[in-house]
Image (spheres, helix red, strand yellow):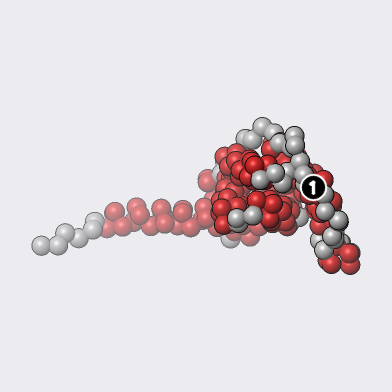
Amino acid sequence: MAVGVPESATRSRAPRVDAIRNREAIIEAAAEVLAEQGTAVDVREIARRGGVGMGTLYRHFPKKEDLIRTVLRKEFLAWADSARQAAIDTEDPWLALTDFYQEALTGCARHRAIMENFALTWSVPDLEGIQELRLVVELLCARAAAAGLLRPGVATEDLLLLLVSLGQAAQLTDERHPQMWTRLLCISLDGLRAVHDPLVVPAAARRS
């Protein structure tokens, strides 16, 4: 004999489904707005894009900082996972390092909040995602050094600070001069090599 689900139980589950959907909508909208406007964003814009009221937003995230940390943790973890897999899939240590910078700076140029947080906390990470990203950079550094491709004395901290510096340059120039930052990247990477190659500037940077 089948036992039916009490009507009260059905009613109690429905708000939970709505709540999960609303929370996901808020996080998705916040990620979009934070990328465009940075952490100074007005939460009313997030609520509007997420299709929820301010009361709903505050029920899920009582403080703006709670929402920002939730979004950035998710974004940094996704970045770290993608970078780690790319590093594993690329056998050439130098190509793995250069590809990491190319992909990372492309993302930094288009995500203001990530760049703001990374610039402030790269040396003392306050998010799990940044800690994971540091481990990826450490791996890339160790592989390139072990292969004799990295100039002596270059450490993980150097590579992280370079990423912050170039990320700032990418944000400043990418809107009016897309890919102009690739010239700086080429110059910087050449300076990191144990043996310097002639500077080859990508065509996109030359056109800028």
Q: Position of residue 13 (x, y in %)?
A: 35, 54
Indicate whether 120 appears above or below 59.
above
Judge whether 193 appears above or below 123 on screen. below
Q: x and y percent of residue 202 in the render? A: 82, 63
Say whether residue 113 is left or right of residue 196: left
Check disc 1: other Cα within 10 Å, few if <14, some if 14-19, many if 20+. Answer: few
Task: Answer above or below: position of 205 versus 136.
Answer: below
Task: Decide which of 40, 52 is in the foreground and name it.
Answer: 40
Which amino acid, by three-letter code, is at mark 1?
Val
Residue at image mark 1: 195
The answer to whether residue 128 is above or below residue 188 is above
The answer to whether residue 78 shows anywhere in this view is no
| Residue 144 visible somewhere in the drawing | yes
Question: Which residue lies at the image location 46% right of the left edge and 54% below the top edge?
Answer: 20
Extreme residue in the left direction: 1
Q: Element at badge 1?
A: loop
User: What residue do we see at 69% from left, 48% from top?
Assistant: 114
Q: Position of residue 65 (x, y in %)?
A: 63, 40
Left or right position of 30 against 119 = left
The total number of labels drawn is 1
- In the rendered image, which quarter contains the C terminus? bottom right
Quarter of the picture containing the N terminus is bottom left
Residue 181 picture location, percent across and down: 83, 55
**At 71% from the left edge and 41% from the top edge, which residue is drawn?**
160
